[in-house]
Amino acid sequence: MKDPILIVRNLKVSYKLRGGIIRAVRGVSFKLMEGESLCIVGESGCGKSTLGLAISLSLPPNALIEEGEILVNSVNILKVNPASVRGRLVSLIPQDVGAALSPLNTVGEIFNDVLSPIRSSKEDSYRIASSILESLGFSDPYRILKSYPHELSGGMLQRVLIALALSLNPKIIVADEPTSMVDASLRKDIVDLIRAIRSKYNVTTIIITHDIAISPSLCDITVIMYAGKIVEIGPSRSIVENPLHPYAIMLLKSIPRIKRIVRLKPIPGIPPDLSSPIKGCPFAPRCPNVIGDICYNIEPREYRLGDRLAYCHIYSGELHDTVPN
């Protein structure tokens, strides 16, 4: 059996702010095989984007990896020169399309800069870039290369960012909310495009999204995060059709569905303050299935339930009759 292409082990990431320390990722571990696609899902502030930035070595200067390992092909990328990783092993498609590209440079000039480690000339850079752009549906890639970012639509810019992420032939691509900054009419096109590049370029993909309902159309596996920790992980379709963790159940009930009309049920309460220590289960104050002092004082361990892992006390042997539905 092949080794995983990605292993994240007990990763802890914090931010130093004027008001204190925010512990955004609090001990996350998972594995991903080559060619697989993973969705990281959760509410704003759950740590999903921070996790993606850490994996792509794109954290801001005020972030600190306090503990843990990120192994790509068995190499801990936290111990090597970031320049040898970014774009080559792991590439990031950032969330803010408009801010990601310099308004002072043409798309071709941006590609020329990104491709500088491997191209021999500007013409070589344009040849590589035009080939990738054409594979992403641009009928006239040279016109795109001569354009400035402000001359392109949001959908076009999203595809340019995907092309840039592919340009150094990375093993893993991390896409942060790839459908959030485009028109609703273009979201399906972006989803289809991500699926297509995964197949065409044999790249492992990590998709960060707040919308758990789209995970089966994008990813093989879904990780659900809450307050900096994983609460459930497993096959995407299984999680969407039959979530196990109370937070996952409530998250699905809180989002609109296109195919059927259901009454939305917002999750009551607010997430915990990540600048303060959290005792027990972080979801306990909002959980309808909370089990007295256990949930408030003891951090839930990992429970394997078929092809899934859930981190919830209701799945311990003596409490199994309290499983939610």
Image (tube, rainbow, N blue to C red):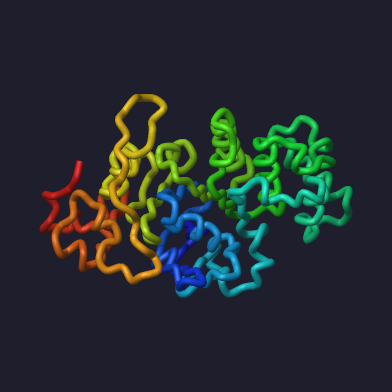
* Residue positioned 74% across, 36% down in the render: 134
* Residue positioned 69% across, 41% down in the render: 157
- Residue 214 appears anywhere in the view: yes
- Residue 19 lies, in percent from the top left, at 47, 71
Q: Is residue 4 left or right of residue 175?
A: left
**Quadrant position of the N terminus in the picture:** bottom left
Query: Is the residue 176 above or below the residue 68 in the image?
Result: above
- Residue 98 lies, in percent from the top left, at 67, 46
- Residue 282 lies, in percent from the top left, at 30, 61
**Residue furthest front in the image:** 19
In the image, 75 versus 1, the foreground residue is: 75
**Residue furthest top in the image:** 260
- Residue 111 appears anywhere in the view: no
What is the quadrant of residue 186 in the picture? top right
Q: Is residue 217 left or right of residue 273?
A: right
* Residue positioned 59% across, 37% down in the render: 182
In the image, 282 versus 28, the foreground residue is: 282
* Residue positioned 30% across, 30% down in the render: 263
- Residue 54 lies, in percent from the top left, at 54, 63
